Amino acid sequence: MRFHQFDLNLLVYLDALLTERSVSKAALRVHITQPSMSEALSRLRDYFADDLLVSVEGRRMVLTPAAQAMAAPIRSILLQVRAVSTTTKDFDPETSDRRFSIMSSDYVAEVLLKTVLPGLRQCAPGVQLQIHRLDMEDRRQILRAELDLLIAPEIVVFNQLPSEPLWKDSQVWLVWQQNQLVGETLSLEQYGEMGHVCTGMDYHIAEFLNLSGVARRAELTVPDICMAARAIEGTNLIATMPRRLAEIYAKPYALRLLEPALDFPPLCERVQWHTRQENDPGLIWLRNYIKAATASA
């Protein structure tokens, strides 16, 4: 479709190019070949009489001033088109083949796979979920509506976008069943003396322990909390993690849960979406489905 001699299909490609600042990444983003994206960029340069993206230092590409100025308006146009196309359609989970993108921590992903996915396959067999690992920088994609949902702790979601509580979880201590150094209970002194499995994302635990005057001896640091659970089996290590996740991993990895001798603050997970998707019937259905499934877990 053309509007004032401009092929409106190119807007999607232009948005991808301005966001990714890479022809190859933009092509992957919109599922076309790299030569096709290169051709689209050439047509866009001809239309706007501007290079839009220029190469510096050999490989890195940056936006021209004109491209920087049009990035936000183009994103806004596409969001408005998306909002119109979704809010004017009914959503039937039994027949829909829509793909929803969700960003979450590995902990949340494990809970979703355990509680949401089995029932989803029954009531919405064609619906697809694409789960992205939570990253403090990449989570900003929700500000551009490049994600359908962000599921994250209260301190991580954005105040300027709508969100709602999803669940609260308590922290527990997790040890190997055959750990002879640990009885039915564990004192704070013993806890501090043990070797701990820590992750780069448990900063809230580290901060609380520091404020409480409790030191941890980190013998092993791993990228994610699920790996921490697996690392405990066969060792005398201990980990502090959300109860829901600990219960998932306890049986398959021969682990047992201990109630902490410290009153950790609850972990409060929220689900967030972009304002322009407020009335999206598909997202409303998915949010409600996730809330119901995780509430009963």
Image (spheres, helix red, strand yellow):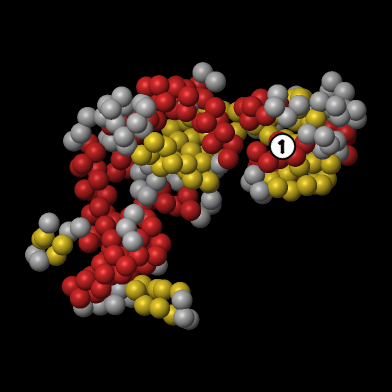
Identify which residue, 174 or 230, lies in the foreground: 230
Q: Residue reaching furthest bottom?
A: 57
Indicate left or right for 200 with 128 as reference.
right
Pointer 1 residue:
230
Q: Residue at x 64, y 44 (%)?
A: 224
Instruction: Farthest residue to the top: give it.
Output: 296
Q: Position of residue 98 (x, y in %)?
A: 32, 37
Q: Is residue 181 above or below residue 213?
A: above
**What is the residue that sits farthest to the left in this orientation?**
4
- Judge from the rendering whether residue 164 lies leftward or rightward of residue 134; answer left or right: left
Q: Image point 78% across, 34% down: which residue?
A: 233
Coordinates of residue 36 in the picture (x, y in percent): 29, 65
Q: Quadrant of the C terminus?
A: top right
- In this view, 47 is above or below 283: below
Q: Is residue 29 left or right of residue 183?
A: left
Three-letter code, disc 1? Arg
Q: Decide: is 68 above or below 15.
A: below
